[in-house]
Image (spheres, rainbow, N blue to C red):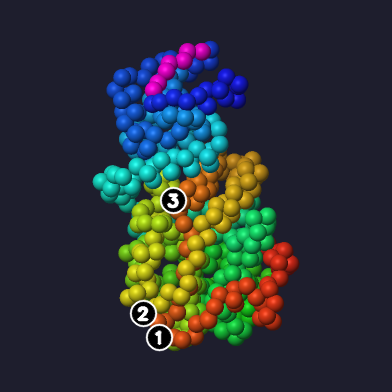
Amino acid sequence: MKDRDKELLSVPSGPRSQRVREAGDPDRARGRVSGIERRLLAYMLGAIGNPPVQLVLWDGERFDSARGPSVARVHVHDRSALLRLILDPELYFGDAYTSGSIEVEGDLVGFLESLYRSMARTTASNPLRARMLSWFHRPRSTAIAQARDNIYSHYDISNEFYRLWLDERMVYTCAYFPTPEATLEQAQVAKMHHVCRKLRLRPGESVVEAGCGWGSLALFMARHYGVRVRAYNISREQIAYARRQAELQGLGSRVEFVEDDYRNITGGYDAFVSVGMLEHVGQRYYRMLGQVIDRVLKDDGRGLIHSIGRIRPGQMNAWIERRIFPGAAPPSLAEMMEIFEPAGLAVLDVENLRLHYARTLEHWLRRFDRAQTRIEEMFDARFVRAWRLYLAGSIAAFLSSDLQLFQVVFNRGASNEVPWTRDHLYRDIAGRPPAPAAAEAGAHEPASV
């Protein structure tokens, strides 16, 4: 960035525009910005809280949307992108960024975080606008007939793609960082121990997992806690990978991977666990999920649900739901209670790991950026831009508190088999503090297919 441009980003200014004509301006054949376009643009910026950004339009005109320094400069390269952005900024910004008709100069995560904070203030003060957005941005159905297509479009695009930027165990959920300096591998191992300790797993017990990803947690529970696991998933690619890993690690007799919907779970189990699936269930089916848990959980059984969530009811970012995560709908805690209360399940503990997910995503984005050339060869430049925006936007959403990460532990309301304190989370079975995560990281068979 030129020194003159750096200065421009830090000059305090109110909502205003200025026309700057220099060598290298975009093709003037696109036409100058009209007065009505300026008024619509000013209205749109006000509707999203006048975030601290500067817009540079195709004819060189610049708009400062807020007083104070700008965190980024957004270049809008054509009239069509501007009009679509004015029509629905939440949805069409992502499309325009993916196509390259909008570019962000500056820190993408910082820009998105400031945008989410501004939008949150505006939405809170304008409930009518929030209701209108929820009407226009309804997520796709998560009924059985649609659920497999939703999952396929995100998880089944390529195991090789995910292997490029996830940890060595292919864990695609929030990690747990015992210290901020822990590696991603260490933090994912610590997360799995954290989940198993919360479930108080004992050798010989039976566990059912709803939505198992590439099988890392199911295999970890069997290997380190001596339990038998039946894990359900409707992603063909993930199930095939998980079954291969079970055989490679010699756990095929203790872990069964079932390619089926969570609604079809059968049997009886000492523990129920779901990590990163509830976001895809849809509130309409929460009561049904509770019925499934009630049907399969033994009298003294216990469970844990780990899910992206929200402080208050709302919807996933429209662009992410439409283009990246079809059907995704993170719940508030109040909405999650529709799982537990009708089924007579008692909530024992709730933990919010919001900043742990932001840290996890930062690791993923760095690895994604290092693998960018290979990913573009596998797909194309538009795909790279879309997924980079998705990862950066997710970091910003957790940092701005737009999204939360809940771990909810529960059991049957009449069961007195509950821990007296949380001490069991922070000691091993011999009464010592748990070993550092570093001692576990890498202590398993290679994840190869």
Residue 337 place in picture, x, y as percent:
37, 69
Viewer-side residue, 159 vs 192: 192
Tag 2 and tag 1, C-beta contact below 8 Å: yes
Query: Quick one: which residue is furthest to the left in this view?
Result: 128
**Can residue 108 be seen in the rendering of this structure?**
yes
Residue pointed to by mark 2: 344
Instruction: Point out the tag, 2 or 1, that comes first from the N-terminus.
Output: 2
Separation (CA) of disc 2 from disc 1: 9 Å
Residue under label 3, please give it: 402
- Where residue 440 sits, quadrant-wise, is bottom right
Label 2 element class: loop
How crowded pointer 2 is (Cα within 10 Å; few <14, some 14-19, many 20+) is rated as: some
Which residue has dot 1 on it? Answer: 414
Q: Earlier in the sequence, mark 2 or mark 3?
A: 2
Amino acid on which disc 2 is placed: Gly
Q: In the rendered view, would you say 165 is above or below 61?
A: below
Q: Position of residue 200 (x, y in %)?
A: 56, 79
Q: Quick one: 201 or 122, which is closer to the camera?
A: 122
Residue 210 is tagged as: none
Give the residue displayed 60% in from the left and 25% down from the top: 1
Span highlighted in magenta in the image: 16-22
Q: Amino acid at mark 1?
A: Ala
Q: Which structural element holds mark 1?
A: loop
